[in-house]
Each structure stands twice: as C-alpha cells, then as structure tokens.
Amino acid sequence: MKFLSLAPFVPSGSDFNGSKQLFQELGFNISWDGGDYIGFEKDGCTFILQHYDNEPFAQNFMLSVGIENADDFWKEVSDRQLPERFGIKLSKPIDQPYGREVNIIDIAGVCWHFVQS
C-alpha cells in the first residue's frame, strides 16, 4: 500500500481569522475553504486549519516543515514583522542534530519547526 499524502489538522486557537491570515503571510495558499476547515498548501506541503480552540492540545502539538534555508526564512519572517503583527513567537536559527531550524509558536500555541536539513 502506497501512502499518497499527509495533511494534519492544525488547531486555529481562539482567532481563526488571524490564524488564516498568518499562514497566508507565511506563504501558504488556500487550496479549499470549508468554513471551519481550510486547506493550505505550499510547494507540496499541506495541512488543514481547523476552527478549534484547545490550548493544552495546541501547546503539545508540533509540526516539522522542511525548508531550503533557515537563516533566510528567519530573516523574511522577522523583516515582515510577523511576530509583532500576529503575537507569535519566533526563535533565531539554531543547529540541531537533524538540521538548522527556526521555531514559530503560532497563534494557537502550536510549535512549527522549520528545518533546513
């Protein structure tokens, strides 16, 4: 059996529209919109933003996204002032055993690991 895709359901937190806007600012495109569920895609990476607010769940949910260059990604997010505009947390690039990474804690509290391997 061949698996064809993986699209996790990501909680939006209390600000569904703000989360939707944040992911568009990060470069994701809306591939479909079902009201309380929105499909996002960028370069073959997909996820579903769910209108769901459960802080303990979100704070224990993590995703890893492969990127070409962690330093360039950090600079772009910083230059666009996404932390200030959306109230998210952004780490500086750090080296991990699995690659150079930038972490974003999104509006809901989900930790996104953007990893250059």
Image (spheres, rainbow, N blue to C red):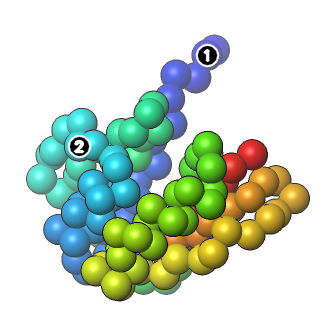
**Residue in the image at 61% along x and 43% along y:** 68
Tell me the tag on residue 2.
1
Label 2 sits on a secondary structure element that is strand
Furthest toward the right, the residue is 97
Q: Is residue 31 above or below residue 89?
A: above
Quick one: label 1, few (<14), some, or many (20+) residues within 10 Å? Answer: few
* Residue found at x 87% / y 59%: 97
For image coordinates 18% across by 57% down, the residue present is: 36
Residue 9, image x, y percentages = 40, 53
Count numbered badges in the picture. Answer: 2
- Kind of residue sitting beneath label 2: Ile
The residue lying toward the viewer, choosing from 45 and 82, is 82
> Image quadrant of residue 41?
top left
* 44 w.r.t. 75: above or below: above
Label disc, if present, on residue 30 of the rendered structure: 2
Q: Residue furthest top?
A: 1
Amino acid of disc 1: Lys
Q: Is residue 105 left or right of residue 62?
A: left
Q: Regarding mark 1 in the picture, which secondary structure is present there?
A: loop
Position of 117 with respect to 97 (left or right) is left
Q: CA distance from mark 2 to mark 1?
A: 26 Å
Residue 29 placed where, x, y %? 27, 43
**How far from the left and from the top, in percent, is residue 3?**
58, 23
> How busy is the neighbourhood of tag 2: few (under 14 within 10 Å), some, or many (20 plus)?
some
Q: Residue at x 30, y 79 (%)?
A: 86
In the image, 86: left or right of 57? left
Q: Quadrant of the N terminus?
A: top right
Tell me: 89 left or right of 64: left
Sequence-wise, the earlier of marks 2 and 1 is: 1
Q: Is residue 58 visible?
A: no
